[in-house]
Image: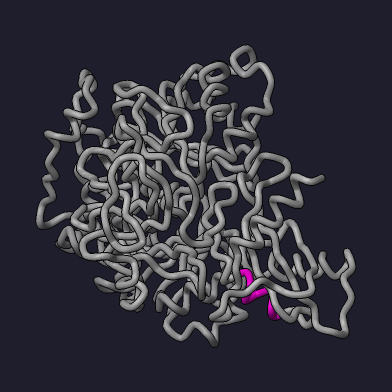
Amino acid sequence: MPLFADDARDFEQLCETFVWDIPPQFNIANAVCDRHTALADRIALYCENADGEEARYTFADIRHLSCQLAHALRTLNVVPGDRVAIALSQRVETALSHIATHRLGAVSLPLSVLFGPEALTHRLADSGAKVLVTTADLAHTCAQFRDQLTDLAHILVCDQPADAAADFWALLRQHPGNFKNVDTRADDPALLIYTSGTTGPPKGALIAHRGLLGNLTGFELSQNFFPRTDDVFWTPADWAWTGGLLDGLLPSWYYGTPIVAFEGKKFDPHKALSLMEKYRVTTGFFPPTALKMLRSVPDIAQTYQLHLRAMMSAGEAVGEELIQWGQTALGIDINEMCGQTEHNYMIGNCNAIMPLKPGSMGKAYPGHRVEVMDANGQLLPTGEVGEFVAHRDDPVHFLGYWKNPEATARKYTGVWFHTGDVGYRDDAGYLWFLGRADDVINSAGYRIGPGEIEDCLLRHPAVLQAAAVGVPDPEGIRGDIVKAFIVLKPEHTPTDTLADDIRALVRNNLASYEYPRAIAFVDSLPMTTTGKVRRAALREAAIADASAL
């Protein structure tokens, strides 16, 4: 049952009257799969890949297959608390692996197929993952670094097993299609999602089973009272990220609603529109970058017969232009949302019951408390600029950073969690984002930490110092792009060939979206008195240089 009746008309009243009801015992597998016995024959997943191959799975299929996989993982000695890494894109094996892992009381670790060797190895090693479910290509990559992955005991491959990996489907089919789930508490860990910060390597954010429930108020309202009887959901966001998993797959299945999975290599706006038409998609999550690419398609309403009724967008600012385009081209109001891996789905819009203010993030959704705080830890009144902080007494709030209590502690002032976002609240209660308190780069909906990029840049034999910042994308597509400022060693001279070589180093070792699309060779980097790079000064200089062109 949805939390809100779709005839509600007063957002403020929903916020005032809503109270969380979190059961002591809660398991994601039960919530998104097992409890849908009355919907056993309903389609749960429409699958399609880039070659046009299609498959459909009912909720009964998902339950049967995920139970088989849970048995298979148990034979590999996976026990409660173990980490099962899942490096797959939008495909049925991804969903099955998450559900099977939750059945066991283990922790699923989503990983992007875009990760290079270094990014993949760090996450597998740091998490101590016992099992990896992936493709043959990534299994081959891991095999080259297996000596660094001392905890990784098994690799299951979904296509063509190689390098001593096991066949995912062959192993699954050896087991029965029923399984008694481990009785997990709502506070038990369910997901470990790595998120980028400004310094050091990415940190693993540990998310409890209750985290799914904490997403639901925002999910329902951002989709204008989800679900409706004929709803079908799709997002192009990778299921390896919070946006694809907790803003898409899992809440859709919590309500017994079908979702589309498309395994493509790159986002193609024409293909996206064809998919939405073909599967009669009614709701979804599209990052602003994807919306900007859709906007390049002319005469959408005349070319495609769409059934959209609502859409959420997040990851970067949507802006007035995109909202107006959505109204004209798609016939819908796009509800902007703001969330983080550590504290997701906390702020947003619901144009069905509240006026949209283009440029605003919206208001705190029911059940979430967000305030504005100054540098001294004092909460600020309306109109004053400070950092957005969220109350930690919230089911969506994470359990902490994996094996990093110091980093966890630094995120709090008392009961308030620091988001790193700076802005203010207006007289009507809307929250307005002005920028980041830290230096995390938002590009194409991805949060990118400069520290990981800089560490990689410094491995190049020609690089003496490096700093990475986000600067506006000159093409206006990705929001920001990564720009690297590089001080070369004395024996090296700046050339286009050297810049390309440096880009290739990052692209081949980290994720493809992390490489610096722009490189500037400089004599020195601006520093603080304590020896820290002043990234804000670099960003300001880059923006000023672009404006002068």
Q: Position of residue 366 (x, y in %)?
A: 22, 38
Q: Quadrant of the C terminus?
A: top right
**Residue in front for this viewpoint, 464 or 272:** 464
Which quadrant of the structure image shows residue 137?
bottom right
Asked if 44 appears above or below 263 in the picture, the reply is above
Q: Position of residue 192 (x, y in %)?
A: 37, 65
Q: Is residue 358 left or right of residue 11?
A: right
Q: How is the image coloured?
A: one colour
In magenta, the rendered stretch is 453-459
- Would residue 78 be seen by someone viewing this image from the given angle? yes
Residue 454 lies within the magenta run: yes
Asked if 390 appears above or below 42 in the picture, the reply is below
Q: Position of residue 265 (x, y in %)?
A: 64, 48
Residue 370 lies within the magenta run: no
The residue that appears at 34% across and 60% down in the rendered structure is: 418
Asked if 227 appears above or below 195 in the picture, the reply is above
